[in-house]
Amino acid sequence: MHRFLRQSCRMLLVVSLLVFISFTRPTVEANVNPPLRMGYGVNPAVSWDSGIAQLGFDWTKTFGPPPGRLPYRVLWRVEAKAQHLQNLDAWGQGLEQAARSSARYVEAWEIGNEPNLDASYGWNAPPNAADYTRLLCEAYRRIKKADPTAIVVSAGLAPTGRIPFTWNGHKGYCAPGVGWCPIYYQDEREFLREMLAAGAGDCFDALGYHPYGFAAPPEAAPGSAACGPNDFCFRSVEVIRRIMVDEFGVDKPIWATEFGWLVDPGQVGRPECRTDPAMAGRMWQVVSPDQQATYLKNAFAWAEAHWPWMEAMFVFDYGFNAMPEWMVPSCDARRFYDIKGRPAEAALKAMQKRYAPARPRWSTATVLVDTGPHPQARGSVRLSHDTPEPLSWTVVSTSGPFPIQVVKNQGRDDEPLMFTVQRGSLGVGTYTGTIRVRVRGPAAVPVTPETTDITVTLKVASRVRQIHTPWLGR
């Protein structure tokens, strides 16, 4: 039988002409945050490359835990392959631990990469959207348990073009021995339909997609001659959006976790790569370095003007051309997607950007003192915000009819701002003072408002005493 009265706890009771209750509560505000609009990111060879901040970009992707707090937001792409289903619980536990330990350094998580491909960097088995959805939902549950503020992004789907075959009941599917298919892979649109039919819409905050431009300019519309019969173009993501919303009622953002244009090796001093096996089959996609610059800049402009549902875009790639050959082969395509040191870097640096602002909110505080032996009291306030970046605060000044002494002049958003107040010569009554605080975020991220006056209410009573009262428990 449960016992409901098990022990006593301490509480404050104010005895005076008036009874005052001391409490701290958050400021009540409507959520006025706009969508994450826009996120400017890259897929870098080195996630802490200082050139990313010089670009004015506010996101980077990592392929492992970041070394610490980077000066921009972080999307961590984690491995999600078929073999992880063999011990789903252990894989999920590992993600949960990583999310908990990295909460201060990672804003978003991408669960896998191109799972509609059978490749060493994709699903690494015949693609199966329902199986991938099981991994995605486990990852979502575990990451949100560890860090409820984290953004979970589904793996960026690879644009494969239209595939006219069905294999084992899966539409748009290539498999050895089927038609002209050399390997296993699935049309990204059919893979998405199978994902959403399996319940994936409940297991991500944003859908990942790779809207590479191929040879088409970013303005080319799906179905146009410029995109060709496979819709190989940047705006193919519009079809992905229609499938999500119109066919499955999933109205969630999309993140372009990779996109870019491939420069002609012969125009950047590497003509021998045109016939190298690593590039020969891609030569139909290549553009000039100047076209790469223009197309990337115009792609961001198009998304900002036409796609309110596109939240973050990650250029592929940054810095891979400088990697040693034992890491990136001499004629690997990653060297020719690279924008670093090419006209695209300067164009993107000069491009006007519209960052998603951080919108901090502060709690208020009410503290009690009496006219007798308790002229001093402690209080604290906390900072909260809905955008993913970490914030820091600095106390600018204090003011009011009573002295306010802050314990620490600077702190982070997970640290309370603690202070003490002195009654001085004030009599019984209610008084208000302010603590002026400035809030800052990572480089290039605006804060609105940057400076806030936090209200501190002091209630002076004739007497404050402590009593004991029982509490209910199990």
Image (cartoon, rainbow, N blue to C red):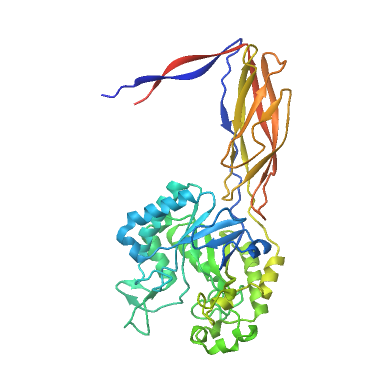
Classify residue 267 by image quadrant.
bottom right
Residue 176 on image: x %, y %: 33, 81
Residue lying at 71% horizontally and 62% vertically, measured from the top left: 352
Residue 7 on image: x %, y %: 38, 20
In the current view of this chain or complex, which residue is farthest to the left? 1
User: 395 or 181, which lies in front?
Assistant: 395
In the image, residue 29 above or below residue 142: above
Residue 115 on image: x %, y %: 41, 68
Residue lying at 66% horizontally and 54% vertically, measured from the top left: 443
User: 268 or 66, which lies in front?
Assistant: 66
Classify residue 362 by image quadrant.
top right
Classify residue 193 by image quadrant.
bottom left
Quadrant that contains the C terminus: top left
Residue lying at 54% horizontally and 49% vertically, measured from the top left: 104
Residue 20 on image: x %, y %: 58, 17
| Residue 281 shows in this picture | yes
Residue lying at 69% horizontally and 44% vertically, measured from the top left: 450
How many numbered discs? 0
User: 74 or 373, which lies in front?
Assistant: 373
User: 262 or 275, which lies in front?
Assistant: 275
In the image, residue 362 above or below residue 47: above
Quadrant that contains the N terminus: top left
- Left or right of 94 on screen, residue 282: right
| Residue 261 shows in this picture | no
